[in-house]
Image (cartoon, helix red, strand yellow):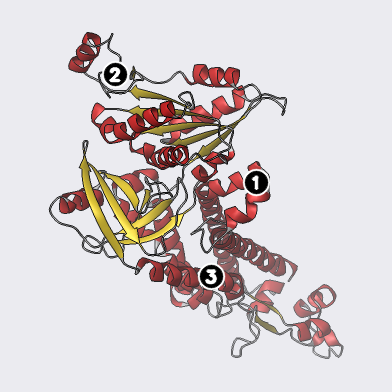
Amino acid sequence: MGNWLVNHWFSAAVLVAWLGINIFLFTYYFLFFDRDPRYFYTRAILGCCRRTLRKQLDHNLTFHRLVAYTLALLTAVHTIAHLFNLERYNHSQQADDGSLPSVLSKMHLQGIKWLNPIHSNQTTVEYVAFTTIPGLTGVIITLVLILMVTSSTEFIRRNYFEVFWYTHHLFIIYFAGLVIHGIAGLVRGQTEESMEEVHPHRCARYLTQKEDDCWHDCCKDPEFGSIPAESWKWVLAPVLLYIFERILRIWRARQEVVVTKVVMHPARVLELQMQKRGFRMEVGQYIFVNCPAISLLEWHPFTLTSAPEEDFFSIHIRAAGDWTERLIDTFQQQKLRIEVDGPFGTASEDVFQYEVAMLVGAGIGVTPFASILKSIWYKFQQADQTLKTKKIYFYWLCRDTGAFAWFNDLLASLEQKMAESGKADFLTYRLFLTGWNTSIANNVALHFDTAMDAVTGLRHKTIFGRPMWNTEFAAVAEAHPRSVVGVFLCGPGALAKSLQKCCHQHSSLDPRKVQFYFNKENF
């Protein structure tokens, strides 16, 4: 009986750990993952806390993946433990050696107080797995989890986003199956009443060596009952929070959005300027956009490129997949009705909390910094004296010259406004062209001595190639030896690793000297 109890408790412990990960994930995701700032004030609440604590909010996707992999691992352990249990059940049912497992397996087969769910020699493990409620729901939720994990790989997300999107919503089936999984009581144990009379440590030997004239308490047969299903207790609160949040998002998304202006920029970048009643934003935030004419269920995140000071909000959409291609093609012919949910918070919201900021954008990843630079322009326009930031370094990496075109006007306006305000050195920007041909190189060589850049028409010259980040960080550290520098990136993971490494290398061990803090946009 001891072995049986150990095996049962092992399965139960794995199940508890498995469910614990679920509740931890859901609680974190819905209570601490920063959502709409008007309703979820996580960043505001942590605004008075240390910067390192606030930065943990920006690791929500990393945390999400970590929990998902842990959940998959514990699911495998849980499944293997049950398979071993079923094999032991089957072996004990077929045994006729008078051993304790054999004796226990043959008790109460006609009633409801049995221990072994395999009641005959003809019942197989496969039969239990596919005909009982615990077995069938276990198979279903395991298959659902496999589909969700495998379709979440970067290759699928990048190339077949719809597959990722729809399979990820199978979590509804997953949690429904999880709640139902334990109601049939396949995992059983000795009842409390029976334990008081026939305790396994005291009475186990009497079960295998029972005498006909046995008279004491251990002569009674132990009685067994199912362990109550408790998974619903673990998921009830998070699911209710999720349902509330979904209803809230649907209500917000149904509010009318008016597209006031449509601009088609070079390199197939579409700009949409919109208005929505009660819409309030901060720099660097993003929204989810849905176009019912293209897909009723797909919502895609886009960074806001407008400033909080403007009377509209805007996004820039680059052609990068079927959905964006169809959206751009359709908007070139006619305006479509779109739905907007948000805005939602990002790391870039904290940019004005730093004395010095380094903004790094790659390609269309410049969009959050468009909002920041526009806001700076308005702050200079209004002579805002509360601006804590004293210096901004802006780096933009692009593969082709066309990508620069839609941002040139903003940079030119900033140059002019800062010169007029006597703060021409407030913004230092560097534009890097990582892809070029012979004609571009020849054109730059012909206009090398001109005051304006031949590629962008701005005062700062375009640099061909990639930045030497160690050199850039060393220069910033030397120029600001006692400042806290915020490094903000919207770009690929490889670039993030390089910048994060530079932040560690160039931060002083003395907390009174220069410190670099890395922040990355996550969608």
Amino acid type for the residue under numbered disc 2: Asp
Q: Which residue is mark 1?
A: 53
Q: CA distance from mark 2 to mark 1?
A: 42 Å
Q: Height in image: 88 above or below 216?
A: above
What residue is shown at x 40% (from left), y 71% (from top)? Answer: 251
x and y percentages locating residue 359 in the rendered image: 46, 32
x and y percentages locating residue 70 in the rendered image: 56, 52
Residue 256: quarter of image? bottom left
Chain-order first, disc 3 or disc 2: 3
- Label 1: few (<14), some or many (≥20) within 10 Å? few
Q: Compare residues 503 and 440 and report the one nearer the observer.
A: 440
x and y percentages locating residue 402 in the rendered image: 23, 30
**Viewer-nearest of discs 3 and 2:** 2
Chain-order first, disc 2 or disc 1: 1
Q: Secondary structure at mark 2?
A: loop
- Label 3: few (<14), some or many (≥20) within 10 Å? some
Q: Which residue is mark 3?
A: 241
Q: Which residue is mark 2?
A: 453
Q: Secondary structure at mark 1?
A: helix
